[in-house]
Structure formats: C-alpha cells, structure tokens
Image (cartoon, helix red, strand yellow):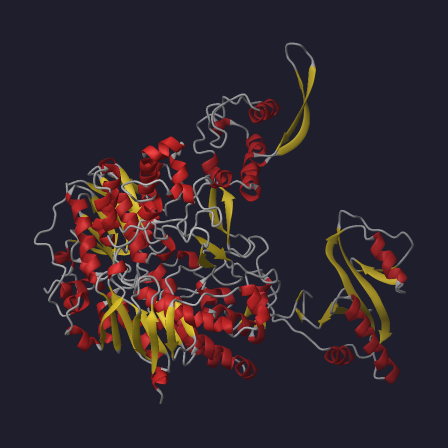
Amino acid sequence: MTNYEENIEVQGARVHNLKNIDVTIPREKLVVITGLSGSGKSSLAFDTIYAEGQRRYIETFSAYARQFLGGLERPDVDKIDGLSPVIAIEQKTTSKSPRSTVGTITEIYDFLRLLFARASDAYSFNSGEKMVSYSDEQIKKLILTDFDGKRVNVLAPIIRSRKGHYRELFENIGKQGFVKVRVDGTIVDIEKGMRLDRYKTHDIEIVIDRLVINDEVDNDKRLTETIKTAMYHGDDVLMVIDQDAPTEARYFSRNLMCPSSGISYPNPEPNTFSFNSPKGMCQNCNGLGTLHEVNENKVIPDTKATIKGGGIAPLGEYKKSWIFKQLEIIAERYEFKISDPIKDIPKEAMDVILNGGNEKFSVVSKTLGVTRDYKIDFEGIISFIKNQYEDSESSSIKRWAKNYMDKVNCSECGGSRLRKESLYFKVNKKNIAELASMDVVELSAWFDDLKNNLSKKQQKIATEVVKEISTRLRFLLDVGLNYLSLSRSSKSLSGGEAQRIRLATQIGSQLVGVLYILDEPSIGLHQRDNEKLINSLESLRDIGNSVIVVEHDKDMIERADHVIDIGPHAGRHGGEIISEGTPEELLNHNTLTAAYLNGSKEIAVPSERRKGNGKKVVLKGATGNNLKNVSVEFPLGKMIGVTGVSGSGKSTLVNETLYPILNAHFFNAVKEPMPYKSIKGLEHIDKVIDINQSPIGRTPRSNPATYTGVFSEIRSLYAKTPEAMIRGYKPGRFSFNVKGGRCETCQGGGLRVIEMNFLPDVYVECETCQGKRFNRETLEIRYKGKSIADVLAMTMNEAVTFFEHIPKIYRKLKTIKDVGLGYITLGQQSTTLSGGEAQRIKLATELSKRDTGNTFYILDEPTTGLHFEDIRVLMEVLNKLVDKGNTIVVIEHNMDVIKMADHIIDIGYEGGKGGGKVITTGTPEEVSNHKKSHTARFLKKELKL
C-alpha cells in the first residue's frame, strides 16, 4: 500500500492563520483536531481539506457546467494527497421553512411515501369500504356474469353534484352523436336549447349504449367498444344500470373506486402523500397543518366595555373616522348606541360588526318626520384582520393582525397537512400521518412488527423499502434522538439535534471510502448521550470511512485513534501543530490540552457558593412544547445553570418562555412567549440581555469593530484630526459602507464577490485598493502615524495600547481583550470568525455597556467552540458580572460550567415526551446527590464526591 493510500498528506497549509504547516492524517481512523478557540482548527479541517475536496469535485464537471459555477479558488496549500470525496457536517442550523420536518430531512418520509404509494390499501371516506379498481377486460367479464340476459344502459358520468344550467354541455354531447342523457336519475332525450335549473345541484350521465347482455360474438365486440367509449367520456369511470331496476347503479373504474358510492381516487403516487405537493397537500392550510384564526376574545377582551370607550381592541377609543361612522349607522339600524356595553348589543348587530354585512334601510326621523336612506356596506372587523394578515405586504401590519389571532390546527386535515383522500390509504390499519406523529422508538417497533401483518403481494413490494426505513430509524436511535417524531418541524430543533440528524442521514446512506468532517457534533448533547454519538462515529469509521472531528470534548479526545493539537495560542499566535499522536502520547506533551487532560491544570470548583440577594423571579405553569406545567424559581444575584438531557425542555423554558416575557416587559418586544400562567419578581431586575449562538454578521462588511460600535468612535476621532478638518471630512468619510471615502471598485468591501450558482459565493481581494477598503485620499489622513485601514488591521492587543488615552474606545477594546480575543483584528470579517469567537464578541459588546447590577443575562451554551482554557477565561468574566450583583442563566451541558454555578435547575428525566419536568434544584453539591437525575451522576464524578 502506498503512503497516500494510508494517509491524507497536507503540505504547506497557509489558510487564515495556519503557519505553512505539514500534517499527516491517517485514513479510515477517527481523528480529532483540538486546540484553543481561534487556533486554526476549522481553517485546517474546513477551509483547507474540505475546500480542496469541494474544488476537486467541481473540476470533474464539464467546461460547460463550470462556466455557470465560476472557478472555486484553490485553498492556500501546496499539496494535498490521498484525499477522498469529502462530506462536511457543519453547525449550520437546519432549514427554517415550516414545510421542513424531521421526516423530510432524514428522507425517511420519502421512503414512507413510496411504501404507501405501492403497498397500501385504499378505503372509501364515504362508506369505509375497501376501494377496488378493474382493467377493461375484468369489467367486461363482471358485466357478462352479473347482468347475463338483462337489458342494461351503459352510462358515462360527467357531472357530479354541481350547480349550473349546462346548456353548452348538452349541445356538445348532441354534436358528438349521443341522443340521450340521464339527468338526476331520469333518462331524457337531448333537445335543442335544453337547460337545467342553474341553482340546483345536478348529476348528469351520457347514455353510451342500451343493449342486452349475452354471449354472442357480435355482442361481445359491441360491449368492448361501449366500455372503451364510456371510459373515455366518463374519465375512467362507467355506470351500468339494469333497465328493470333503474335506481340501482353499479360503478366500474380503472382507478380506485368505492363499489357502493362510486367515488374514485386517482391511483396513488409518492406525491399523493407529500404535503409539499398540490397533489397531496390539504387545500385549506396549503400543507402547513396550522392556520391563523381570529380570536374573538382578543378582539373584544371585555364585554362590559363600550365600543366608544375602546371595547373593540383593534379600533381603540372613539375618533372621527369612517369606520366609527359605519358603526354608528349599524347602531341606528339595530337600535342601540355605541356607548352601550358590548354585552347589551343585539346578537345580529354584533354579527354584522364582526363578520360584515351589506344592506340598505330607511329611518324615519322622529323630530322632522323625514325618511332618510342609509346603506351598510361593512367588511367586518374579523374579515378585515384576516385580510390584512393574508394580503398585506407590510410585516408590521401582519404583526398587528397576528396580535388578534391564534395559531390553530387546520379544521379540515386536523393538523396532518394532507388532503382527505391521502389519509384513507392505510398500511396495517395506519395512515401515513399517524406514522409520522409516532416517536422514533414507537415507529421503529411498529416496523419491526409489520412483516407479519402484510399480504404476500405487499411483502414482496415492501421488503426493500421497509428495510431502508428500519435502518434509518435505527441510526436516529443511535445518535440519541429517540424522542423525536417525523412530523416535528425542523424549525424547533436545537443546533446539536439538527447536526446529529444530518449525521444519522449520512450514516444511513452507508457510503464507503468517504472523508467526513464534523464540527463539534457534541454541542447540545448531554454527557449521557455522548457515548452513543462516539459509537456512531466509530461505526462510520468501521465501514471504511475516514472521520475528522473538530472537538474539545474530553471523552471524544480520549476515544480518538489520532489527535492533532493546534496552537500554541489563538489567532496569529496559533496556526502551528504543537502535538499529534494517540491520546496516550498526547498526555506526555507540554501543551495546554495535555495539561487539562492529565489533570495538572483544571478549572477549580469555587470554595463557596454565592448566597444571592434574596430576591427571585418566579415563573409558574409553563406548558410550551413538552413542558408539563412547570413552575420554577430563578434566585437573583447568582449564576444559575439550567441542565438536562437533550430535548428535555431547557431551551423551551428559558429561550422560548422566560426570555420573551422579560424582553416584552422591558423592551416591548413582539415575540410571543410559550404558554405560561404567571410570572412574579420582574421589579427586581431592570433589563435582560440574551447572548445566543447566531453569527454576528453574514457579510464581509461586518466585523468586530462595527458590531461592538467602537468603529463609530474611531471614525469620529479621525474626523477631528487637523488634516481631516482642513479637508472638511466628516465621520462618514471614514466609513467603508457609504460613498465618499471608500474604494468604489469593491464598494468598501475590500473583496469582490464572484457569484456561484447553487454553491456558496466566492470572495477575491479587490485589485484597486488591495483589500484596504478606502480610497487614496482617505488613507492620507493619519492619527499617530496610522491610517484608518492600519487601525482595522491591528489586533485587539495592539489597539488597546494604541488607544489607551481615549476612554470611550479603550473601554470597549479592553472588554474584547478580557474575554480572550486579544488576537483578532478590528477589521476581521465576521464570516471568518469561529462560532466561539462570535459568541464572545457578543458577550464583550454587552459587557462593555455599563451594567446596573440588576441585569439578567441569558446565555445558551456559551462553551460552544471553546477549549478548556477558553472556558476558564470565560468563567472569570462571567463571575465578575455576578459579583457585581447581576444574574446569569446559562443553559449548558459542559460540566466545567455546571460545577461553577451557584444554583442548578435540572430538567428531565428524558427528552421529548419523557421530559418537561423539573427534577431537582439547588447547589451543584445538593443536585449531585439526586438518585435518578442523569446530570447528577456526571456532576458527582466531576466534583469528586
């Protein structure tokens, strides 16, 4: 075996901060790349190895296809040998579309649709009978045996239960040579100008033939032709009526058909069961399963109030406007006053006010004795709100309308998203929507048992499909997602869940010889499920794939076949390989990672827990998602850790319930919290700050200086320099986002975008300004010998010294340095920051604002992307905040953070339906004694109790 067949050889990698490194990665092994946040792990794994794999893939396309793609730039690396096809499973969150579900992402729902299209039984939604379908030959045989010797009429149904006069239809039928039709059960001759009552519903059939059924050859031929003609005109359905019993019709169809009522379904196709296809979706809710309906109680919150006094919430108090004029006319018509309490207004008047009305009426004036004519033409408050929500272009108007609406399950499909016909196709007495709403454990058991409940024919058809579905379900179980159901919307998945679903999908595809690169798959995963995840990655390796994982998790590093440690520090002080080898070999090296792994360095447990300030926020009766009527206390002035297995309800409690309540209270935010009964204690805090995982900017124009607001101060400083004042430059001159001072070739981006169809855009340096972003005149303005472009190129450490005499700028830069980001430059594009760096910039921005001592901070897994050493620095910053009297709530799985909390709220016991309860609360020491809590078990080990 040659060397590159055993290893992936990377030579001279210089992407971002990598210092021309050479690295050998063994193939078909589980390799972990670790190191400080910002040391260059992702630069090596994603921006070098994955980018080169992507580029080689594009190179295989024809020149014609490549012209639409543009050239993918080669990563800055001398040579990569032994590279297999690369698949990256990154931390990107899944689709936010309401149409995307767990079933569609994992493709299990696609296989289910195939199973139902090929092996299901159809039932009539009218009579519940099993549907039948026949070939022309079978129909002929049935007619010959069932109607032998009888005189029959063969009819083609063309209109079923529809209103209309059908004059043109009768003319057309006559032109085709037919002389009789059956209208509403009676056979009549077609006459010139024949028409029906247009306001009644009618059934119309063409009389194709009238014949005696017998075995004669001529008759046989005639019957074949008759069936063919009837099928053509009747859209694959025909009726046979015995002339002696004209009321009883027998239906025959090439499609699926109910033998007694004659309703027919088209033959099922996979998209008959898709809620994203017009063929399968419920027409009422367009396949979303939910609708927004106006809630009358929100429109009229208090029936004791009057219309004049603002009793109709969307209208507010009385003002001189057209709508109140209309209401006064309605009041005149129904003899009430708009100053009467709403509960006393006649029912029919309220019906017109809410749902609209259209009528003319006259009123005799009692004083003048004159008759006056009025016209009510009123849309109705409910209709108006609905129309605004459905048709308005403005998002603020939509939001306004949403205030008076509730999200309810669709009344037609009951939330199943599918049309009625699709729900009457069943396999083993279950329809596809029932299967999609089972959780993975239940569904897996149902499929294991399915074989015994299928007919021989169904077994033959379904074997392969069922095998595929069962395998994929097993992989979902293996990555710890047993509590999800296929119908769960992907919008509601956490980042870690989404990544593990994609991992399960990849394992399910059973590819061999592929290089998988994963970006911290353990995010959002409880220690208990970590074992399952590592086993899944090992099974990917064992079938013949190479797996590279960028990871900080201790268990993952210890189970790896090979570890690469990048450092020694972050940013421009990193980018070198400081140690590599097996986990055992790594422990003997003198590196930060080794020090934390072998225990010579650790994040110390605080000697005593804070007592807090004695005040608390109490949330009662939270029932969102899977929360089971949870009531919980958040003691203030402490660091609170919210823990529990994945899917237990931590994010629902904190991000979806508590944060929207606080945000609406302090900042009038519009996000609707999940259902809860009451909250007390808000008077003890004065603002809330949420620091989450979302990137700080999605374009190269966003950078740490603009995000933190320090760049505005720097621009003002440059505008005050003598040279700038002589030239009349204002702060806007030093912005790369507006015309004037920026380089116009790249419009201040420093980069030009090459658009890629169906691939990410590629950025190349601007040839005019060499990436400096500004024009020559702007760069001539200098402060302490540095131009504005030089300042953007400084690291935070350099900038702190450079600006130390300007307090406003110094304070913000110092905070960024304190959270451990001294190595990043002021102008570094946000798109190149790692997840951990972006979160700490957000943290620094919030910390640089003057805290009040009563601020409530919410952090969602702040340790994402952080090395043990970074976590130590982060905890120092957070502890300083709490010491000033602020409260911090951290949702976290990382034991180093949990053991440092003053108060823990543990939610569980399991994920999904088995979660949603508060198991135990208290200090880490108290929680670790709980017998059933999964967190307690690992916490005890961490605290060495």
In the rendered view, does 371 fall on the left or right side of 17? right
Residue 711 visible? The answer is yes
205 or 20, which lies in front? Answer: 20
Image coords of residue 147 (percent x, y): 78, 76
User: Which residue is more in the foreground, 524 or 598?
Assistant: 598
- Quick one: quadrant of the C terminus? bottom left
The percent position of residue 311, horizontal first and vertical second, equals 46, 28
Give the farthest residue toward the right.
192
Q: Is residue 746 above or below residue 211?
A: above
Residue at x-position 31% and y-position 70% = 549
- Inspect this view and state whether residue 442 appears: no
Quadrant showing the N terminus:
bottom left
- Could you say which quadrant of the image residue 730 lies in? top left
Q: Number of numbered discs present?
A: 0
Where residue 518 sits, quadrant-wise, is bottom left
As drawn, 259 above or below 610:
below
Q: Is residue 881 above or below residue 358?
A: below
Q: Is residue 724 left or right of residue 930?
A: right
Q: Is residue 590 left or right of residue 832?
A: left
Can you give x and y, in whole percent of width and height, for residue 756 in the image?
Answer: 51, 61
Residue 483, by quadrant, is bottom left
Look at 14% across and 59% down and name the residue there: 603
